[in-house]
Image (cartoon, rainbow, N blue to C red):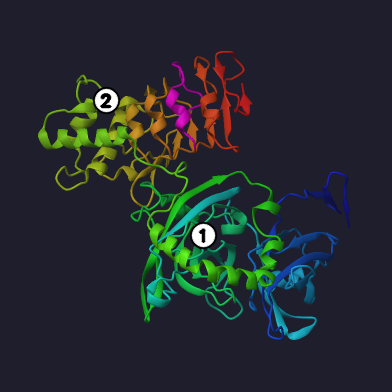
Amino acid sequence: MGRITMNGTITVDHTDGKIEVQDNMIGAYQLSLSAYFKSVFSVSSSYASVKIVGGTFRGNDLGETECIPCSSTPDWCKTFFLDFIPGDGTILEISVFDYNNGSTAYKIGGTRIKAEEVLKRKVVEVPLSNSLSNVLSCRLEKSMIGTEKGDLMFHIRGLDMNNKEPGPFGLGRSDPFYEISKKNPDPDAGGGESWNVVYRSKHIFNNLNPMWQSARLGLPELCFGELKWPLKITVYDYNRKGKHEEMGSVITSVEEMQNRISIRGNADRMQALPVTGRIRGRDLNTGFLCVLKASIGPPGDRKTIHGGRKVEDSKLSAWFCFSLLVLLVLLPLIVGLSIATEEEIKVDRTPLTTFDSYYEDYERDLNATLRGGTKSGYLAGHHTSDPQTKALNWLTTQDGGSSITTNSTSDLLQRYAMAVFYYAMDGDNWNQNTTFLSDASVCDWGSSYGDGVTCNGAGQVTSFRLFNRGLTGPLPNEIGLLFSLKGIYLSRNNITSIPSRIGSLRNLEYLYLSRNDLKTGIPESISKLRNLQKMHIQGNPLLTGDLDPLCDNVKAFFYGAADCKKADLICSCCKACS
């Protein structure tokens, strides 16, 4: 038997104790719905609602799905989370409505079904009460397979999408939108691989290079909390009657999306995900998807992240005639503007990562030094005992894993930067044997404990993790050359300063330098780390400076920990001050 307390906590009594489930907690199971309407002549905007009417948690209203306009086969994105105790007789009441006229909802049908039966069979298809030809499909499964929690904040842009509606004289353009589907853990009742839609973007009118709105989705909904879980992104050409035409798809994962973030502006085809579609019976490239952002933050309000009926979507049919009339009047102007602006789309470039002059100048100087034999620019003026000189000598005389004549300068610059890091941190005296400075790729440099360097799919360093390894000395400016770096995990060492070029790491999200010997002030360039999510620099009692310029630029979910109880270290956005 369950009871609901004043603070929203549901307490369930058992012979072996009590279980408390907070009303804002993600449930142990997730439910997804789809339907097929055969007897409904026209369904403008259908949505479903779910309630628990039997069992321990009876009386709980789980909410509603979003409305899907003009579809007789709606596949709702909304994911319902619920807890139930096997054997307690939990019954779900699911109702489906037609919101066609934009003011009142007509009930298409409903059903009641035992949650345990759905869980056992994974997928259950049941007829709706008003008509046996209207079928509801329910899928219930465990909500977590991996351990990752929080929300993925992502932003996607399409490039060079295949045009499905060229129209007269080839002046027309498709109206693309995309869906993200996760692979189901178990095959459906019919057998074979199946996918469940978890997100659907809005369509962009008349554009083959669409810049869709940024979005946010919980990792349990998106990928069962497993960052490597297969996801399918499918791009469609929107049709007002619901007969959307597929433009192409790509199978990816959250992990790959994070590794594919654009690094050369918002049209980086080298980093983009290639989209494949059917053209005249053949699988061909039909465009690209640029990942402009894919960062993980703390979980938000699940009621506002995704799902829930939207009234404005359901008014489509009421406004259609008026919109069509306006479209006919403005069509020549719209076509002209779309042609003129097809390749030049104004967007906010603030969150995107670009090369700064430091990287470009250093790359030029390294290239000149390697080709000409004389140290140039940033590589000139160093003493023979400096880390930069040692790294250059290693690169040119000892490194069997690089070829000066065949490797790109950017690859050599990355090996050089990591070698400078090794020598600057007194790598020869670290307390754990490592494979640093080996002939292998820098992506394979690490220690017998399994920590070390992590790279993305393009072979670019994204993090290095060396806790309590005896790293000693100032962090070198050359780590600013690792433009894809997202994580610095170097706590419990003897590092003495933060480099002035830290601001070049525009992708940096995690900075862990707690329990070191940081003594000098905070560099001004740290304010440029706009994507920083977590910063741990506590345990450095001699560190002084002002972090408020950083506080002015980081996002609301930023978490900082520092020794900010003392007067000479200021950090108004730090949530943990010691």
Picture coordinates of residue 483 (x, y %)?
Answer: 36, 39
Q: Report whether residue 418 is seen.
A: no
Picture coordinates of residue 345 (x, y %)?
Answer: 43, 53
Q: Secondary structure at mark 1?
A: loop
Identify the residue at horizontal 38%, vertical 38% (top origin).
447
Q: Give the amino acid type for the residue marked by disc 2 in the picture.
A: Pro
Say if the magenta span includes residue 524.
yes
Give the numbered dot on residue 229.
1
Can you identify the residue that label 2 sits on? 387
Q: CB under 8 Å between callouts 1 and 2?
A: no
Does the magenta stretch mainly form a helix, a strand or a loop? loop
Picture coordinates of residue 337 (x, y %)?
Answer: 44, 60
Picture coordinates of residue 542 (x, y %)?
Answer: 50, 14
Q: Report the quarter where the C terminus lies.
A: top right
Horizontal relation, residue 54 to residue 455: left or right: right
Identify the residue at horizontal 60%, vertical 54% (top origin).
217
Tell me the quarter of the picture where residue 306 sits.
Answer: bottom right
- Please provide the residue range marked out in magenta: 513-530
Residue 208 lies, with reference to residue 553, above or below; the image says: below
Q: Secondary structure at mark 2?
A: helix
Tell me the quarter of the picture where residue 338 sits.
Answer: bottom left
| Numbered marks: total | 2
Identify the residue at horizontal 41%, vertical 74% (top origin).
166
Q: Residue furthest front?
A: 329
Residue 263 lies, with reference to residue 32, above or below; the image says: above
Q: CA distance from mark 1 to mark 2?
A: 41 Å
Say if the magenta span includes residue 550.
no
